[in-house]
Image (cartoon, rainbow, N blue to C red):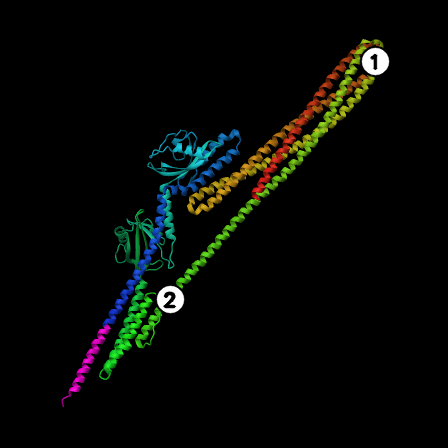
Amino acid sequence: MRKSIIVRLLIIVVIGLVLEGGAFLGYVSFDLSRFARQQADQTRETIYDHEKYSLRDMVDSAYSIVAKYHAQSQDVEALKRLKARELKLVVESAASLVQAHMAATPADRKAQVARELLGMLRGLRFAGDNYIWVNDLDTVVLMHPVSPQLEGKAQRGLRDARGKAMFDEFVAVARGKGEGMVDYMWPKPGQKEAQVKVSFVRLVPELGWVIGAGAYLDDITGELKREALDQIGRIRLSDGNYFWVNDLQPHMVMHPIQPELDGTDLSQKTDTTGKRLFVEMAQVARDKGEGTVAYRFGKPGKGGDYQKLSYVKLFQPWGWVIGMGVYMDEVDEEILAEQARFNSAINGLMGRSGLIGLCIAALMVGLVVLYIHHRLKQPMGQLVGYAGQVASGDLDATVSGRFRGEIQQLADALYVMVASLKERMEEARQKGRQAEEEAAHARAATAEAEEARSRAEHAKAEGMLAAAGILDAIVSSLTQASRQVADLSTEISTGAEGQRSRITETATAMEEMNATILEVAGNSGKAAENADHARLRAQDGASTANASVTAIEEVQKLAVALKSNVAELGVKAEAIGQIMNVINDIADQTNLLALNAAIEAARAGDAGRGFAVVADEVRKLAEKTMSATKEVGEAIGTIQQATRENTRSVEHAVAAVDKATELVVLSGKALREIVQLSEHSADRVRSIATAAEEQSAASEEITRALEEINALSGRITDGIGQAADAQQELNRQCLKLKELIDNIKRENG
């Protein structure tokens, strides 16, 4: 029995449906696979573009850093200002050292000390081979460590390659302003070709010296290059990424992770595929100025090599190729895994859909089409839209509707992917907060360091106040001793005046006695009466002589006490001088340390500028200390000189008192003899004339002795007056020393 047409039609329809279903399933499978590949390629391209733009932005930031340093290297005036502070610190330290030594040197040794200072400055170096030279105001070079053939010769009119008379300008700046900057052409040590150099000069008026120090612009440019490389080399991204710099040769200029590559030839360096990556980077930079290069490169701390994408940009003025790269292996692996999951989901879905379609094709023709439309195409469109929102950055997007089977798995996979992206972004934010916390810790450490520096300055001020207190105690002791000297001088002056008055009375009596003796010689008839009168006058003279002896002995005791006090005053003044020498030595050593610190700070460049300011303040304090100790030393010297003069005056006074005592004793003895002669004059009338002549001669001798005693008393009085003047000078010097100590206390209070 032949089949009916319905059956045939049904068979045809079923076959048609099966074929159509198979063709449809095949087409859908092919289209979804192609869509998956396109999505993977598009995702890869998007990620690559994102990484490329991110690298370009990062390289541009490093490029701007290099451009900033290059702009500084082209501004000569800015470079002069940049180096002025360092050079001024070096020159001022050297000048302060010279001035301090010369101020503390006696006049007879200044020439020798000046030669020694020139020898010391000859050996100083800073910032590499930079040096210090000295010329005078007549352009005569006194010391030049690199060109000693110039020494001892006037360089007036000596011009550089640009026609500038450099030494004349050194002198002009020093005379006009005392200090300043000068730029000129001068060859580097060991080279013949002149290069641009900037120098700072300063006048030392005490010696007529012009002290100078300079730096070459080429060296300054080199320093700026090193600073730029150092700043770029310290930059790290949150993932540890870094910058490197090579040139167009290509040679490695700076690689922060592999510093052993610095300075090496990179022209033969290849990756595992044989690509000469640095040659290609140099070529891209040379041809386009900037661009990307893909290659394979090892990861720090890991074996093997990985796909890497780098962005390079040429900095033409210095011929540097600045680059940064990112490893793409993780991105590729993630894209491949996602593509595999997508293909797996599509294959499973197509298999199940084909089986169901074959089973119910005859009965569910319309339902198959409806099913495909509502259960496959629409959910896939929602998931694609959801994926597009996520790709545009909306990680909080959602998908409405219900999913089944592999579509649900695909949706779950997309949800997992979005959650993973959120976790990565949260980790990035946490790392940012950690960086802020570390910055806060750094600021706290800086504050602690500043507090430590303040405590050190306070301790230094307390040390200066303690030293001022010690000097204050010494000045008080010196003032007390000066008052004792004044009191003793007053007593000696009073005693000397009394002695002088009594000696005058004795001289008058002796003149009267001499007249009496002459009268006895002329009138023999009145010999007895004259003898009695002579005896009485001799007794008065003896009493006066005894009183003079007693007064002179008192003067002698006071003079001895004054001599002892003046000697003690001299010892204390010498002790103060020794203390001032110790303070001067300490200030001198402090100045030397400040000079060394300034030179080290100049070598350190920007990193040492803060320390250079501290060293300059220490140097200024040392200069003030040396100036104060110089004034105190001069005051102490004046006190010591006055003390020595007082000592000599007192010694002369003691010797004069001893002589006066001896003469008065002799006069007393003579007067006693006169008394004895007067008592026996009555029995010796026959020898009155002879005795009278002898008495006249003796009285004349006594008169001369008394005149000498009177003259000595006058000199004693003058010496005491000089001692009083010296004591007043001593008081004035003590007051001056007291004022200096008060100034030290106020400055360090």
Residue 5 part of the magenta segment: yes
Q: Which residue is mark 2?
A: 422
Q: What kind of residue is marked 1?
A: Asn
From the image, which quarter does the C terminus lie in? top right
Assess whether residue 743 is covered by the magenta stretch: no
Q: Quadrant of residue 682?
A: top right
Relative side of 93 to 325, left or right: right
Task: Inspect the image, locate mark 2, and give the three-letter code of the amino acid beneath it.
Answer: Lys
- Judge by depth and name the residue closer to the eye, 495 or 297: 495
| Closer to viewer: mark 2 or mark 1 | 2
Query: Where residue 702 appears, x then y in whole percent?
Result: 75, 17
Residue at left offset 61%, top offset 42%: 469
Q: Is residue 44 above or below residue 324?
A: below
Q: Indicate the position of residue 509 as horizontal and vertical percent values.
A: 78, 18
Q: Is residue 553 left or right of residue 10?
A: right
Label 1 residue SS: helix
Q: Quadrant of residue 78?
A: top left
Using the rendered image of the protein, determine whether residue 717 is visible from the camera's viewpoint: yes
Residue picked out by circle 1:
530
Q: Is residue 725 left or right of residue 420?
A: right
